[in-house]
Amino acid sequence: VKVVESGGGLVQAGGSLRLSCAPSGTTFSIGAMGWYRQAPGNERELVAVFINDGDRTNYADFVKGRFTISRDNAKNTLYLHMNSLNPEDTAVYYCNAPLLVRGRPVWYWGQGTQVTVSS
């Protein structure tokens, strides 16, 4: 079982991207799930998360008003909609989510997807 991200790429400043995260080999379980990022030389940092199984979310200050986290339970997919991208958003973006393993939630990191924003 694993978590798989997709949707990264190269975009010009001011552009948009949508990242997707989906489970492989199982399904999402209950619990908090979200997006993190890590730029070269920096620690991994929170971008946006669903705090629980409802609609409560938490965003990093540097993405408020630009990024939106969403999920489609029918498609078993988590999204990160990124608008007004700037070069400081360049990083590897990771999904962290609970997967159903032997009847219990186990949190997994994806392999990451590169987002590069050119000026």
Image (spheres, rainbow, N blue to C red):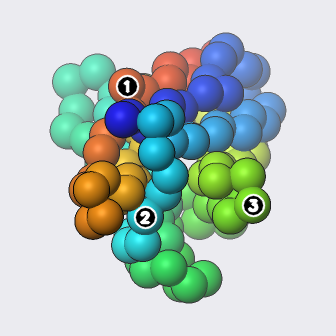
Q: Is residue 106 above or below residue 15?
A: below
Residue 1, compared with residue 99, is above or below; it is: above
Q: Earlier in the sequence, mark 2 or mark 3?
A: 2
Gap between marks 1 and 3, in whole Å? 23 Å
Look at label 2 and name its amino acid.
Ser
- What amino acid does circle 3 point to? Ala
Quarter residue 54 falls in: bottom right
Label 2: which residue? 29
The answer to which quarter of the image holds residue 11 is top right
Q: Is residue 102 above or below residue 104?
A: above
Residue 16 showing in the rendered view: yes
Mark 1 or 3: in front is: 3
Along the line of sight, which residue is nearer the eye, 60 or 23?
Answer: 23
Please tell me which residue is depicted at 50% across the width and 20% down the height of the picture: 114
Label whose residue precedes the other's in the sequence (1 or 2): 2
Residue behind mark 3: 74
Return the residue at label 1.
111
Identify residue type, mark 1: Gln
Residue found at the far front of this picture: 102
Whether label 1 touches label 3, CB < 8 Å: no
